[in-house]
Image: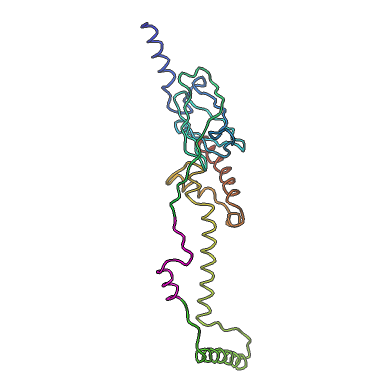
Amino acid sequence: MNRFIFYNILVFITTFNVTGFELAEPDSLVSVNCQLKDLSEKHTIPYAHIVNSRLGIGTTSDSLGFFSIYMRRDDSLFISAIGFEDKYFFLPQFWPSNHFAGIIHVREKVYLIKGVSVQVLGSYQQFKQKVLNAKPPKSPAEEAQEYLREISNEEAIKWDKVRVGINFSVKTLEERSLIKLKELLAAQEKKKMINNKFNEGNIGELTGLKGKELQDFMNYCNLPEDFLLNSSEYDVLVEVKNIYRGYMNRKVKRR
C-alpha cells in the first residue's frame, strides 16, 4: 500500500512540475485535436480562440470548428468565441494518452435587452423640444433683405474682376467655415464607420486580449483605412484573425 502511494506521488511530481512550454518534456504534453460545437450539436463554432496561458500559446478554430493545440495534463484551455460564453476545458482526470480527440461543447450567450416604451407621437417633452427647435418661415421683408444681400455680393465680385482684371472666386468667412465643417463631419463619419468594425470591444472578444496587450495588438494590425471603410465587419474580423495567428506565433518563437 505504501509503495502504491509513493508511486502515485512520484508520478504527480514528475508530471506536473513543469512551468513552461520550452521546458516541458515531450511525454508530458498532450496533443489536443477537437471540434467545437454548440450544445445542440447542430452548429460548429468557427474562428474561436483557444489559449493555453500556462504554455503561452494559442490557436483558432477553422471554418468547421476544428483546432489543434498542446497542453499538459493539469493545464486548462480558455475558449472564447463571438456569440458564445467563455469556457475552460480540462482533460479528463488521469488521462493516460498523449493524444486527445473529441467534441467540446460551448454554450451560446444570451443577451438580455431592456424593455422599451414605444410612443407614436413621442412624449410631451419631445414634442415641446421639437416646437422650440423649429425654425419659423421667413417673412417677405426678410426674404427681400436676403435677396438684396446676394445681389450686392455678386455685384461686388463682378466689380473686383473688372478693376483688377483677374477672374477669381471670393469665399466669405461663412463659406470657408462651412467647408471646414463639412470636412470635419466627413472625417468624423469615417472614424465612426471604422470604429463600428474595428474597436476594442469586438477585437478583444475575438482575440481574448485585454488592456495594453489589446491596444498593442490593434496597433500591430495596421489595417489600411480604405480596407476598413469598404469591407464588411465579417471581412475585417477574418483579416484580424489571420493577423492574430501570426502575432501569436511570433510571440511563441521569441520565447
Way the structure is coloured: rainbow
Q: Is residue 65 or residue 11 the one in the foreground?
A: 65
Q: Number of marks in the image? A: 0
Nearer-the-camera pick, 93 or 207: 93
Asked if the magenta segment contains residue 11, the reply would be no
Percent of width and height locating residue 147: 55, 90
Q: Examine the image and state in which quarter residue 116 appears.
A: bottom left
Query: Which picture quadrant has residue 125?
Result: bottom left
Residue drawn at x 54%, y 25% is: 31
Is 123 displayed left or right of 238 in the figure? left
Q: Residue 127: where, in percent of width, then height?
A: 43, 71
Quarter of the rendering occupied by the N terminus? top left
Against 115, is 50 above or below?
above
Most distant residue in the front direction: 120
Left/right of residue 14 with respect to residue 155 in the rendered view: left
Query: Whole-percent x and y of residue 110?
Result: 48, 43
Up the image or down, 161 lies above or below 94; here it is below
User: Is residue 126 within the magenta segment?
Assistant: yes
The magenta stretch is 116-133
The correct choice, above or below, for 175 with respect to 81 in the image is: below
- Picture residue at 60% right of the left edge, 49% below the top: 235
Which residue shows up at 53% across the image and 63% down it?
189
In the displayed structure, would residue 59 be above or below residue 151?
Answer: above
What is the x, y in percent for residue 219? Answer: 50, 50
Q: Nearer the viewer, residue 219 or 9?
A: 9
